[in-house]
Amino acid sequence: MEKPILATDVDGVLLNWKGGVAAFNASRGVATPREYLCPRNDVPLRQLFDTECRDQAYDLMIEFNRSPMLGQLPLLDPSAVDVLQRLSQHFDIVAITSVGEWAETHERRRQNLKDLFGDVFREVVCLPLRVSKKEHLARFTEQGRVVAWFDDLAEHVETGKELGIPSYQFQFCPNGAPSKPGLFRSWRDIESHLEQTMLVA
Ligand SMILES: [Mg+2]
């Protein structure tokens, strides 16, 4: 039987991209202030990569996303591994990630996810940086019922809402309560929500 589809972003939802940037910065002798790494802090790229120049910050981001370090990102929410494993019994889980257009980056992203989560993903869609996820969210809605979409960026959450998908923002904070409706702080919160809404029997 076809399972309903649960769709999720990767950076800032499953993987700790900013944590990887901190390691990348350290490799070039730059310390990353601890507060920059908090998921609640929306830190401009210039600050994150410690440069005054916007173009240089963008170039450093591309250098990082094209490097082997991109394939070794740590988990963001450690509870996500067990939760996704359980949810995969009820849902087809798909990931949609704007990680860049390079084939080796796509391989590293998929391997990183496989190393941490095993085979829980039905599909991992890798897109160029900063593109809309609309086309792919729409494709999944044509394939089946998409019961939830999670992203850390409000603009991608809005895209899901425009398509009529129940769409939620994710901002990891293990001990924090959601500050607004439609915001989740952890994958345990997501699992509870799905149980309460009877999506998980
Ligand atoms: Mg993200």
Image (tube, rainbow, N blue to C red):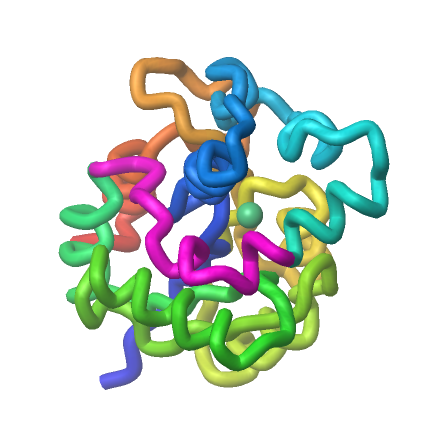
Residue 3: image quadrant is bottom left
Residue at image position (65%, 57%) is 62
Decide: is 49 above or below 8.
above
- Whether residue 114 is visible: yes
Q: Which quadrant of the rendered structure holds the C terminus?
A: bottom left
Residue 148 makes an appearance in the image: no
Question: In percent of the image, x 16 and y 57: which residue is there?
Answer: 85
Choose top left, top right, bottom left or bottom right for residue 112: bottom left
Q: Position of residue 34 (x, y in %)?
A: 47, 16
Instruction: Give the residues in magenta.
Output: 63-78
Residue 106 versus residue 3: which sits nearer the camera?
A: 106
Asked if 148 appears above or below 24 in the picture, the reply is below
Q: Position of residue 104 (x, y in %)?
A: 48, 77
Q: Viewer-proximal residue, 18 or 8?
A: 18
Which residue occupies the foreground of this view, 87 or 20? 20
- Give the vertical position of 80 relative to 199 (above or below): above
Magenta-colored stretch includes residue 102: no
Left of 186 or right of it: where is 90? Answer: left
Left or right of residue 48, residue 46 in this image: right
Query: In x, y percent, where is residue 132?
Result: 72, 63
